[in-house]
Image: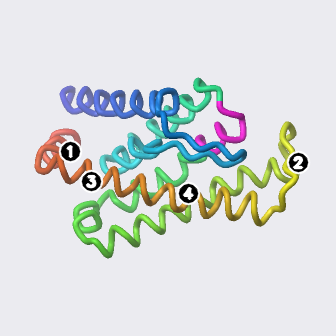
Amino acid sequence: MKKTNTLRLTITALLTAIAIVIPLVMPIKVLIEPASFTLASHVPIFLAMFFSPGIAVAVSIGSAIGFLLASFPIVIVLRALSHVAFAYIGAKILMNRREEILNSPTKSLLFSFGIGVVHGAAEMLIVSLFFYGAIPGTSYTDGFFYVVFLLVGVGTVVHSMVDFLLAQFIWKSMGNRVIKLDKKMFN
């Protein structure tokens, strides 16, 4: 039992560390406030989702801390914090169906799109609070459709799907090693 807890903690810590470092050092960042697209910023979260809901939530919180430490605007930090929602939901869905979903191109595409929509909706909610002044500090001159729906909503779905594909590639490239690791952690 103790070995399993140590292994889970180690995996969680490694993925969290990667999630914190990506916003700090990734050279490919597009910032069109309130939208931001940092390549691979969701990859550690998706990898954590493949393990468990608890790990996914912890890594999501770490990612938000990374965006805070990288001095991104508060709207972007709060968008990063909203990742807890899609990470938890996605991990719960994958919990008993991970291999079935990840090994089927159709099912993984549908899962990626569905979780991307949840991801985008959560971020749109955060940005809407700023857009309508419920959270002060930022004002947007462009319209709601452009700022919230297109930039944040659609942009997030696309970004999420690209990062899911990267995480899935990493997971599959590790082959049976991650399956054995997962079994050691949870069986």
Amino acid under label 3? Phe
Residue that label 2 marks: 133
Above or below, 170 against 117 in this view is above
Q: Disc 2 and disc 4: Cα gap in Å?
A: 22 Å
Residue that label 3 marks: 169
Amino acid under label 2? Gly
Helix, strand or loop at mark 3: helix
Residue that label 1 marks: 182
Main structural element of the magenta stretch: helix, strand or loop? helix
Residue that label 4 marks: 119
Q: Any magenta on residue 22?
A: no
Report the side of 166 relative to 67 (left or right). left
Amino acid under label 4? His
Q: Disc 4 and disc 1: Cα gap in Å?
A: 25 Å
Foreground residue among 51 and 22 = 22
Amino acid under label 1? Asp
Instruction: State the residue at coordinates (14%, 50%).
Output: 175
Q: Which mark is residue 173?
A: none
